[in-house]
Amino acid sequence: HIPFLKNFSRYLTRDRATAEDLTQETLLVAIEKFDQLRDPDKCRAWLGVILRNLYLGTIQKSKRERRLDYHDLTDILPADSNWRERMGRDGFSDRVQHQLDRMSGKYRQALVMKVFGEYSYKEIAQELDIPLGTVMSRINRGRSFLREGIGNRAGENRVSRIL
């Protein structure tokens, strides 16, 4: 689960060094509280909640706002994924990133968690503490916003295949 934690922390912090610290702190807390993991099948979601809570605690302590800005699309993609190939090299990924940057934070966060973080709808609902229907709606609206913003048929087809 370490690659997932690194990617998720990079998305949240937007800084590689801070993300590494957050990932390490998450693992330390997880080791300390491992006896509290009720369902081993949900270990990844449990780790994600720990990471997110640590991140939010850091934000509160420093009195900074939590930033939902999507930073570098290729930076949060799992290293073993084929997203880079599927996105292509014709500037398509730049257009997708531009649309993600323009998207409302609540839609972007749910969409990024689903598509790039590979969370289930239920895990997203639990982590964001919102109803499942709201998660589904936000992801659907985020996908629609991406499709509309790409603007060409080839792009729309490619977005549909990716999302």
Image (cartoon, rainbow, N blue to C red):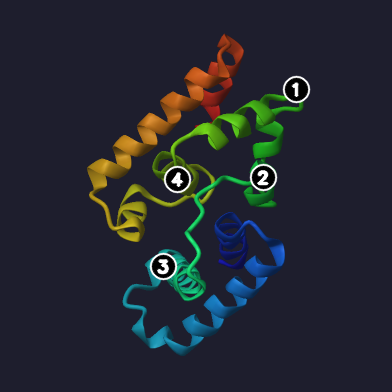
Kindly identify which residue carries mark 1: 90
Identify residue type, mark 4: Lys
Identify residue type, mark 2: Asp
> Could you tell me residue 151's position as x and y percent?
55, 14
Residue found at the very far front of the displayed protein:
63
> Could you tell me residue 136's position as x and y percent?
31, 39
Separation of marks 3 and 4 at Cα, in angstroms: 15 Å
State which tag comes first along the sequence, 3 or 2: 3
Separation of marks 1 and 3 at Cα, in angstroms: 36 Å
Give the mark toward the camera: 2 or 1: 2
Separation of marks 4 and 2 at Cα, in angstroms: 17 Å
> In the rendered view, would you say 91 is above or below 139?
above
**Left or right: residue 49 compared with residue 10:** left
Kindly identify which residue carries mark 4: 114
**Left or right: residue 7 compared with residue 51:** right
Q: Check whether the beta carbons of the residues at disc 1 and disc 4 lie within 8 A of each other.
A: no
State which tag comes first along the sequence, 4 or 2: 2
Instruction: Say which residue appears at 57% left-offset and 45% top-offset.
Output: 70
Give the mark toward the camera: 4 or 2: 2
Kindly identify which residue carries mark 3: 49
Kindly identify which residue carries mark 2: 72
Kindly identify which numbered label has been placed on residue 116: none
Instruction: Say which residue appears at 47% left-offset and 60% top-offset.
Output: 65
Q: Closest to the observer: 71 or 131?
A: 71
State which tag comes first along the sequence, 1 or 4: 1
Q: Closest to the observer: 91 or 87?
A: 91
Q: Check whether the beta carbons of the residues at disc 2 and disc 1 lie within 8 A of each other.
A: no
> Could you tell me residue 105's position as x and y percent?
44, 43
Identify residue type, mark 1: Asp
